[in-house]
Amino acid sequence: MGLEQLLALLRQRFVAVGHGITFDVIEGGVRQDGDCWYVSVLATRNGRDVPRELAVNVFANVEDEFEQQHPVSVLFIPAVDEQVGQS
């Protein structure tokens, strides 16, 4: 799976999460190591960073679902937007 296909599938999956959370995959924060992709993702709600515990929980669920549907492993790295700060 190439980078562009991976990004499109991940963005599509994150839109389906909902709950008022916006997930921004940071293209510059994506790297591949063998069959594993490391992907930086910024999770915000109402213009503020989502609490790290919530983001990590959502990421774990999406990682599991993604691995069941595709032949690659994805690990999300929670990103923080210094402009909006922590909630």
Image (cartoon, grey):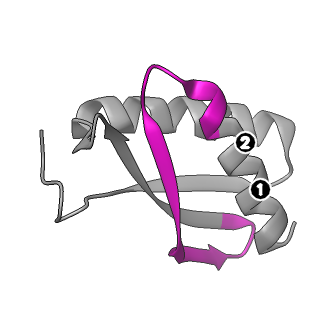
Q: Amino acid at mark 2?
A: Gln
Image label count: 2
Q: Amino acid at mark 1?
A: Ala
Name the side, left or right, on which 63 lies relative to 5.
left
For residue 68, which numbered disc appears in the image? none
Residue drawn where x is 55% and y is 29% of the image: 61
Q: Nearer the viewer, residue 81 or 37?
A: 81
Q: Position of residue 16 (x, y in %)?
A: 65, 27
Determine whether 53 is above or below 29 in the image.
above
Q: Position of residue 83 (x, y in %)?
A: 17, 64
| Residue that sits furthest to the front in the current view | 46
Position of the N terminus, as image quadrant, is bottom right
The residues tagged by marks 1 and 2 sit, at their Cα atoms, a distance apart of 6 Å
Residue drawn where x is 17% and y is 65% of the image: 82
For residue 8, which numbered disc appears in the image? 1
* Magenta part of the chain: 14-36
Name the side, left or right, on which 45 lies relative to 14.
left
Identify the secondary structure beneath mark 1: helix
Residue drawn where x is 74% and y is 41% of the image: 67
Position of the C terminus, as image quadrant, is top left
- For label 1, the crowd category at 10 Å Cα-Cα, with few meaning under 14, some 14 to 19 and many 20 or more, is few
Q: Is residue 24 rendered magenta in the image?
A: yes
Q: Nearer the viewer, residue 60 or 13?
A: 13
Q: Is residue 37 rendered magenta in the image?
A: no
Determine whether 22 is above or below 73 in the image.
above
Determine whether 7 is above or below 63 in the image.
below
Identify the secondary structure beneath mark 2: helix
Name the side, left or right, on which 45 lies relative to 11.
left
Q: Which residue is mark 2?
A: 12
Q: Determine whether label 1 and label 2 are within 8 Å by CB.
A: yes
